[in-house]
């Protein structure tokens, strides 16, 4: 039974749950299904008949390639540059069972994440048939690869060759791979439309080596998601082999700069520009306000004040009540004779962003339809009750109903024989 940890922010509906591992629905390999039925006839002619059948199935997954559509996100981002010396790379996959598709020793994940510099690796594309050919150099555990897989021999896979000594230093063993991989569930109900359709289950794999960095120099690095099938016991690699070959299922490049200042985190840490504002004698301009042309609904034009939400000080001009419309969020300053449309703009922007969500828009349309139906029922019920109180004759009831309907639609001058 996998262990799980649930995190939920206070007063928020968004939920995150961490799961130790996800078992694949069916393990890879050959399966045999047997069906048997025994029929017994009672009575004068007592007979017994036994029927059975047997079918074999082969369950196969990809072992040397992967679908790039399964990748949800990577960190650091592909082609990104910055101070990554203290950062472990990680990758998030849409396939929640991916790290545990193949059985390994100790139920450890069959994949790992390795970060190497371009000088530490030699990589190229080869066919799977060429990969599985027995060879002495570089070392590759051909016998440990699965006998059943989806790829064909002529399909191309990507391999990376690194020094044996370096591989033994940076490669995680089975116990470490279990700690560096986990599954998780995210509540996607408040996300965009394409994310709401997903089930919210992901798998995450974390690297065991910090991204290589050097002071004063940009180091190009590649992060590889590699197959560890055959490398469960790192000591089994022959001492005579100088290089080790790994199958790279997915890879992306980053540029690590030991003393870089271009990264967002480093820029924000070094940011010290004082109070953001305009250095002038006007108090309103010094507080960040900007005069903007304002067109009213009536067609009149004037100047109004606007200020963004990022204030370097506490905002004293807060609204006392929640406005029902964007016009209700405008604040009038009598000493200037001008409106402050900052809250009004924020209200309208929030309204447009809300209506942009398809799920919310459909819910609003459905609510309006139900509300209209309810009001129509109330009007009909009220009319019938009023007719019942007056107790008109049956011959007059139709005439009164027609008169009431014509009055509502503006047809008082029309005549209708009943």
Image: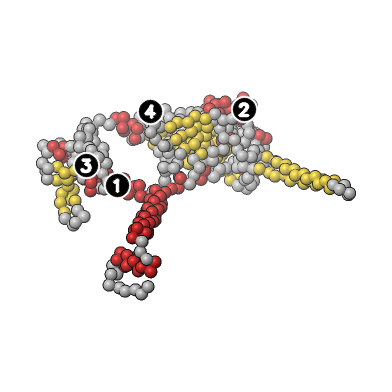
Q: Residues within 10 Å of mark 4 (few under 14, many from 20)?
A: few
* Left or right side of 242 for 283: left
Along the line of sight, which residue is nearer the eye, 316 or 98?
316
Q: Name which of mark 4 and mark 2 comes first in the sequence.
A: 2
Residues at marks 4 and 1 touching, judged by CB atoms closer than 8 Å: no
Task: Indicate which disc residue 307 carries.
Answer: 3
Under tag 2, what secondary structure?
A: helix
Viewer-nearest of discs 3 and 4: 3
Distance in Å between CA atoms under marks 3 and 2: 59 Å
| Quarter of the rendering containing residue 235 | top right
Give coordinates of residue 366: x percent, y percent. 41, 52
Residues at marks 1 and 3 touching, judged by CB atoms closer than 8 Å: no
Q: Name which of mark 3 and mark 2 comes first in the sequence.
A: 2
Colour scheme used in the picture? secondary structure
Image quadrant holding the N terminus, namely: top right
Q: Which residue is mark 2?
A: 106
Task: Indicate which disc residue 306 carries.
Answer: none
Q: Residue at x 41, y 29 (%)?
A: 85
Along the line of sight, which residue is nearer the eye, 380 or 151?
380
Q: Name which of mark 1 and mark 3 comes first in the sequence.
A: 3
Q: Which residue is mark 1?
A: 349
Under tag 4, what secondary structure?
A: loop
Q: Residue at x 38, y 29 (%)?
A: 258
Image quadrant holding the C terminus, namely: bottom left
Under tag 3, what secondary structure?
A: loop
* Left or right side of 1 for 216: left
Give coordinates of residue 226: x percent, y percent. 55, 36
Distance in Å between CA atoms under marks 4 and 2: 40 Å
Q: Which residue is mark 4?
A: 215
Q: Residue at x 19, y 53 (%)?
A: 296
Q: Name which of mark 1 and mark 2 comes first in the sequence.
A: 2
């Amino acid at each position: 039974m996998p262990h799980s940890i649930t995190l939920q922010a206070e007063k928020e509906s968004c939920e995150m749950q961490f799961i130790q591992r996800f078992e694949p629905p069916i393990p890879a390999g050959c399966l045999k299904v047997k069906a048997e039925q025994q029929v017994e006839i009672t009575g004068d002619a007592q007979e017994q008949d036994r029927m059975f059948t047997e079918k074999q199935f082969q369950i196969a997954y990809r072992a040397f390639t992967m679908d790039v559509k399964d990748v949800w996100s990577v960190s650091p981002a592909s082609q990104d540059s910055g101070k990554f010396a203290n950062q472990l790379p990680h990758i998030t996959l849409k396939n929640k069972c991916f790290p545990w598709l193949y059985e390994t020793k100790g139920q450890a994940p069959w994949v790992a994440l390795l970060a190497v510099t371009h000088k530490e690796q030699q990589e190229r594309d080869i066919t799977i048939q060429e990969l599985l050919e027995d060879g002495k150099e570089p070392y590759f555990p051909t016998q440990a690869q699965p006998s059943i897989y989806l790829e064909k021999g002529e399909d191309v896979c990507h391999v990376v060759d690194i020094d044996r000594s370096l591989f033994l230093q940076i490669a995680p063993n089975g116990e470490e791979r279990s700690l560096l991989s986990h599954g998780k569930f995210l509540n996607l109900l408040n996300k965009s439309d394409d994310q709401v359709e997903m089930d919210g289950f992901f798998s995450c794999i974390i690297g065991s080596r910090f991204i290589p960095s050097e002071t004063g120099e940009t180091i190009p690095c590649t992060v590889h998601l590699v197959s560890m099938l055959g490398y469960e016991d790192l000591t089994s690699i022959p001492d005579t082999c100088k290089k080790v070959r790994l199958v790279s299922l997915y890879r992306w490049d980053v540029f690590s700069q030991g003393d870089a200042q271009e990264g967002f985190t480093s820029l924000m840490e070094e940011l010290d520009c004082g109070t953001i504002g305009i250095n002038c004698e006007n108090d309103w301009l010094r507080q960040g306000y900007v005069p903007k042309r304002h067109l009213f609904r009536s067609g009149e034009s004037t100047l109004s004040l606007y200020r963004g939400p990022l204030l370097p000080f506490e905002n004293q001009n807060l609204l006392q009540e929640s406005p029902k419309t964007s016009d209700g969020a405008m604040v009038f300053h009598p000493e200037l004779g001008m409106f402050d449309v900052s809250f009004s703009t924020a209200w309208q922007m929030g309204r447009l962003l809300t209506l942009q969500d398809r799920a919310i828009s459909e819910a609003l349309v459905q609510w309006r339809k139900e509300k209209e139906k309810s009001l129509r029922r109330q009007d009909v019920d009220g009319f019938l009750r009023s007719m019942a109180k007056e107790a008109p004759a049956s011959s007059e009831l139709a005439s009164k109903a027609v008169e009431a309907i014509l009055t509502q639609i503006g047809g008082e001058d029309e005549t209708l024989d009943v």
